[in-house]
Image (cartoon, rainbow, N blue to C red):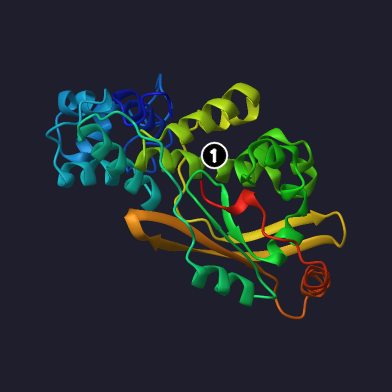
Amino acid sequence: MDQQGGSRADIRDFLVSRRAKVTPEQAGLPSGSRRRVPGLRREEVAVLAGVSTEWYTRLEKGHISGVSEDVLGAVAQALQLDEDERTHLFDLARSARAPRRRPARRKDVPVPPRVQWLLDSATMSAGFVRNGRLDVIAHNALTRAVHAPLFASDTTARHGRANFARFHFLDPVAADFFLDWEAGARATVALLRAEAGRHPDDPGLRELVGELSTLSPEFRTMLATHDVLIRHDGTKRLDHPEVGTLELAYQSLQLPLPGRTAYELTFYTAEPGTTSEDRLKLLASWAATHPTPADSADQPR
């Protein structure tokens, strides 16, 4: 995810990193001996994809013009890419083929009132809308209560908007708040890399990645793995400063809006009958009796 997102370097680094993760045994090939590289050799990927070694070598160097989707699909299958990785490879290919334009700063579009009504009606779920840069665009009262350290963070105050990536990597409080900090951090980086594949010329995203790369060694290390993530659902464990441990299930949904803007709508909730549900009820009661006025941090600019 360098300053030339969608470039040959992005394609090369992604393919090399995926090739290194597949062993000959996983690909149904003899392992042999005296292998000098981890994972598969280029010629082995070429055989599995049904192309010449010369052709695959050119592809791995980022020469992707003229490559059909069928061939890209064969390479994805040979490298055993999962659905998100396959989508990312095709996104990189489209970006590399597209005519280069002067990058324009993407503006977030306002969240329609009906979406805010939906968020506010979910009194026992912490709901929020985020963009691809992991900025919080809109949220309900319970989200502010559940993610209180995020909204109280200096990273939010400095930038005028809560951002999960900045909080994760630049606020030391995050390591205590997220009980599975490393897994969450890796997912955060993977989400940003996938976003860069879709929008390689987004100046705001470049600035965010540059800032995190400069200030966080952990971010730089995780970025170098070239892992990608598009869908992000599961369980989050939080050490809340007021109610203690919360184990919450979260589900994300695409929220398409005018102008081809696509936000993510996410809800956190607790399993019924659990201690986490009781603690979430406490936070919901507190949020209902301590309303916070909507602040400028949540308004698209």
Label count reads 1
- Residue 161 at what x, y percent from top left? 63, 45
| In the foreground, 40 or 257 | 257
Using the image, determine if residue 238 lies above or below residue 289. above
For this orientation, the residue located farthest to the bottom is 273
Using the image, determine if residue 136 lies above or below residue 114. above
Question: Could you say which quadrant of the image residue 31 lies in?
Answer: top left
Question: Could you say which quadrant of the image residue 156 lies in?
Answer: top right
- Residue 209 at what x, y percent from top left? 52, 31
Q: Is residue 134 left or right of residue 153?
A: left
Residue positioned 40% across, 55% down in the render: 262
Secondary structure at badge 1 equals helix
Amino acid on which disc 1 is placed: Val
Question: Could you say which quadrant of the image residue 48 lies in?
Answer: top left
Using the image, determine if residue 296 lies above or below residue 94. below
Q: Is residue 44 left or right of residue 222?
A: left
| In the foreground, 208 or 186 | 208
- Residue 20 at what x, y percent from top left? 41, 31
Residue positioned 15% across, 36% down in the render: 67
Crowdedness of circle 1 by 10 Å Cα count: few (<14), some, many (20+)?
many
- Residue 201 at what x, y percent from top left? 36, 33
Residue positioned 66% across, 71% down in the render: 125
Q: What residue is shown with label 1?
A: 189
Image quarter of the N terminus: top left
